[in-house]
Image (cartoon, grey):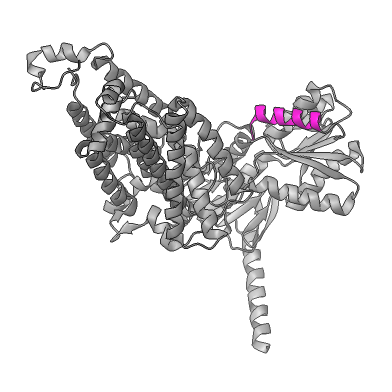
């Protein structure tokens, strides 16, 4: 028992020393490294915002940066790209995955060759990456989504869910948090239907119209997906239900700006995608330097201090866009 | 005359292209040549397309088309995964059941086409929707994954650490299909139907039964491709076969099999599988984006059909013009068109 306590004390003090050392020394950027960022697909504005932040950070971190991804949101396309990055001997691969399981074997092969793997936004299975950057804590996002409609549709609102696909990991995690928070805080709020827009603007719009036609009692649509939120808002506007039905979701400010100004979307939580792209590069640099442990802290100039908790780093609290602040963000 | 720009020179041209591509990438692209096994292992990333292409060849030789291969492979993989994960069935038994199910789905395509007289394009387009929705419904919100190390060997293993398992299976199957088409009565009837359906019918060939078996074969190969994908990714998804269809058709056509049927062979298809696979993987390793490679595959499909049609009697018949130039004249053939 005594030796156990001793061991704990020693490890705790070692941990403290390591933390202190990190806080003081800056990141070693003497050697140029090659880092790739693999989004779910190329040509989507939220991922471009990540890229924008990553490019800014890459300059100061002596990183040779590459942004590459599949043409469609396919995990198999991502695997092809990851395999090619392994063959090209990249030092670090950062990826937001289309699904957690299919990417795992190829990422494990990358790790076996000494390549640092950092996932962000949508995680892969934990044994297939070194670190995961979670954009916001799931419970916080769930709360922000519910609060964004509760303030306008009231605590007794009949809510419809419009998500991307039935097996989208991050959407399901958020919706789980939405249900938990709703049940605990607003017991009279009710989810009447859950529909899917397959992350496609046109399918999301028709799913949104279906919801409004089939469930006239619905006064709020929670659509935690970029295309789904736009589809829900467009459906509300098309049927002239502004002020009666409120949408919220997780979309970049550029695509929802008009709906926020029209009042269809009163509040919509997300996070600062540009800042997140910066953080991804810092973590990639630290991971490639072998300078980050599974439980650790580090400071990013301009962003703040982050805690690594069992290889998971939480980027920030949700950032809620409203008519007042949305013009401050351009991505 | 049947041989206009004969299949033989087409195959020879494909060999030349493959050798040029492969050696070009080995020399010019750092990271492409990665030791003997490392380089061969690149084939693991595209051979599932090849399995589908072999089965599709049989259907296209009859002049038909099978658009449901992608959904059959997704559905077969999902069936296998559910049998393993939810019913605890032995992995290899589940593989057999899934491949059998693929054959059944293909056979159903054949029944619809021959008994209900629905055009292959429409019939398999419809079953494609049906099969893929069944797969999505079965797979549910969290499709199964993690099928164990032994099963993973099918997609990523290597025999004696040298030759990828997938490559060995592909070569054996390609030889099997080649024998089936050129050395068996069934294969002869298959090509005859594609070449001239009415003549085959009046010659006493049971056109419908030959066709039904062709779609069945295509279903079996599609299901097998789905199983290999499941092994490679160690996971299944209902839509995992969606990418297979278009590339596989490209491989069959580039391989020299006429989209109208009755013309071409398995050697060409095998070479086309290697060419498109090496090209795509090589370009990705060389740092071209997915956009450029996808665009190039489209361009290749277009130009290969155009070249083939321009030289064949079904098109402008440039082949006969070239043949009149004596120094290019191939040995005379006895086969005649009419």
Q: Is residue B282 visible?
A: no
Q: Residue A293 at x, y = what percent?
A: 59, 63
Q: Residue at x 68, y 55 (%)?
A: A306
- Write down the quadrant of residue B206 in the picture: top left
Residue segment shown in magenta:
A199-214
Q: Residue at x 18, y 31 (%)?
A: B12
User: Split into 4 quadrants, where in the image is the N terminus of chain B?
Assistant: top left
Q: Left or right of B320: which side holds B239?
A: right
Q: Nearer the viewer, residue A322 or B5?
A: B5
Q: Left or right of B56: which side holds A65?
A: right
Count the numbered circles shown: 0
Q: Main secondary structure of the magenta part?
A: helix
Q: Residue A154 at x, y = what percent?
A: 92, 40
In the image, residue B282 above or below residue B332: below
Verify whether residue A212 appears in magenta.
Answer: yes
Q: Is residue B329 visible?
A: yes
User: Split into 4 quadrants, where in the image is the C terminus of chain B?
Assistant: top left
Q: Residue A37 at x, y = what percent?
A: 53, 42
Q: Nearer the viewer, residue B115 or A15?
A: B115
Q: Nearer the viewer, residue A309 or B315?
A: B315
Q: Left or right of B199: which side holds A16?
A: right
Q: Nearer the viewer, residue B37 or B212?
A: B212
Q: Residue A134 at x, y = what percent?
A: 66, 50
Q: Residue at x 15, y 14 (%)?
A: B322
Verify whether residue A269 appears in magenta.
Answer: no
Q: Residue at x 75, y 30 (%)?
A: A210
């Amino acid at each position: 028992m005594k030796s156990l306590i001793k061991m704990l004390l020693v490890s705790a003090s070692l941990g403290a020393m390591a933390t202190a050392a990190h806080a003081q020394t800056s990141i070693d950027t003497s050697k140029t490294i090659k880092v790739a960022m693999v989004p779910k697909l190329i040509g989507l504005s939220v991922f471009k915002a990540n890229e924008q932040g990553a490019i800014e950070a890459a300059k100061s971190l002596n990183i040779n940066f590459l942004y590459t991804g599949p043409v469609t949101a396919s995990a198999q396309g991502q695997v092809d790209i990851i395999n090619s990055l392994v063959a090209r001997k990249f030092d670090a691969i950062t990826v937001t995955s289309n699904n957690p399981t299919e990417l795992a074997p190829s990422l494990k092969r990358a790790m076996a060759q000494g390549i640092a793997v950092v996932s962000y936004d949508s995680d892969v299975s934990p044994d297939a990456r070194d670190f995961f950057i979670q954009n916001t804590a799931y419970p916080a996002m769930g709360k922000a989504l519910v609060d964004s409609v509760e303030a306008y549709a009231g605590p007794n609102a009949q809510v419809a869910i419009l998500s991307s696909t039935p097996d989208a990991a991050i959407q399901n995690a958020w919706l789980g948090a939405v249900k938990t928070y709703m049940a605990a805080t607003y017991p009279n709020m009710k989810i009447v239907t859950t529909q899917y827009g397959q992350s496609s603007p046109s399918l999301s719009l028709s799913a949104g119209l279906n919801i409004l036609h089939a469930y006239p009692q619905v006064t709020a649509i929670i659509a935690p997906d970029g295309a789904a939120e736009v589809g829900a808002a467009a459906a509300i506007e098309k049927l002239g239900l502004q002020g009666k039905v409120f949408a919220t979701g997780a979309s970049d400010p550029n695509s929802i700006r008009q709906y926020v100004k029209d009042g269809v979307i009163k509040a919509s939580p997300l996070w600062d995608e540009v800042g997140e792209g910066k953080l991804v590069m810092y973590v990639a640099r630290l991971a490639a330097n072998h300078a980050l442990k599974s439980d650790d802290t580090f400071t990013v100039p301009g962003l703040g201090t982050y805690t690594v908790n069992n290889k998971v780093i939480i980027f920030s609290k949700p950032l809620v866009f409203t008519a007042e602040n949305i013009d401050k963000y351009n991505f | 005359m049947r041989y206009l720009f004969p299949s033989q020179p087409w195959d020879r041209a494909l060999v030349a292209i493959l050798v040029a591509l492969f050696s070009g990438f080995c020399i010019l692209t750092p990271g492409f040549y990665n030791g003997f096994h490392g380089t061969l292992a690149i084939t693991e990333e595209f051979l599932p397309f090849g399995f589908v292409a072999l089965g599709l060849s049989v259907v296209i030789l009859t002049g038909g088309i099978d658009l449901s291969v992608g959904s059959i492979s997704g559905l077969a993989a999902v069936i296998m995964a559910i049998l393993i994960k939810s019913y605890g069935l032995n992995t290899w038994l589940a593989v057999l059941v899934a491949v059998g199910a693929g054959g059944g789905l293909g056979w159903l395509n054949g029944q619809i086409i021959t008994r209900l007289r629905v055009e292959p394009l429409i019939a398999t387009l419809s079953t494609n929707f049906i099969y893929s929705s069944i797969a999505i419904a079965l797979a549910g919100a969290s499709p199964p994954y993690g099928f164990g190390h032994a099963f993973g060997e099918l997609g990523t293993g290597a025999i004696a650490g040298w030759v990828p398992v997938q490559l060995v299976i592909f070569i054996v199957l390609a030889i099997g299909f080649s024998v089936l088409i050129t050395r068996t009565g069934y294969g002869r009837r298959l090509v005859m139907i594609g070449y001239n359906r009415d003549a085959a019918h009046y010659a006493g060939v049971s056109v419908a039964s030959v066709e039904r078996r062709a779609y069945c074969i295509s279903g079996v190969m599609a299901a097998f491709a789905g199983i290999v994908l499941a092994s490679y990714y160690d996971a299944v998804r209902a839509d995992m076969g969606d990418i297979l269809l278009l590339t596989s058709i490209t491989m069959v056509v580039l391989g020299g099999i006429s989209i109208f049927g009755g013309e071409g062979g398995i050697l060409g298809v095998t070479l086309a599988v290697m060419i498109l696979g090496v090209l795509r993987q090589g370009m990705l390793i060389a740092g071209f984006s997915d956009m450029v490679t996808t665009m190039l595959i489209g361009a290749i499909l277009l130009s290969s059909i155009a070249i083939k049609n321009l030289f064949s009697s079904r098109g402008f018949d440039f082949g006969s013009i070239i043949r009149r130039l004596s120094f290019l004249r191939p040995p005379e053939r006895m086969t005649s068109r009419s």
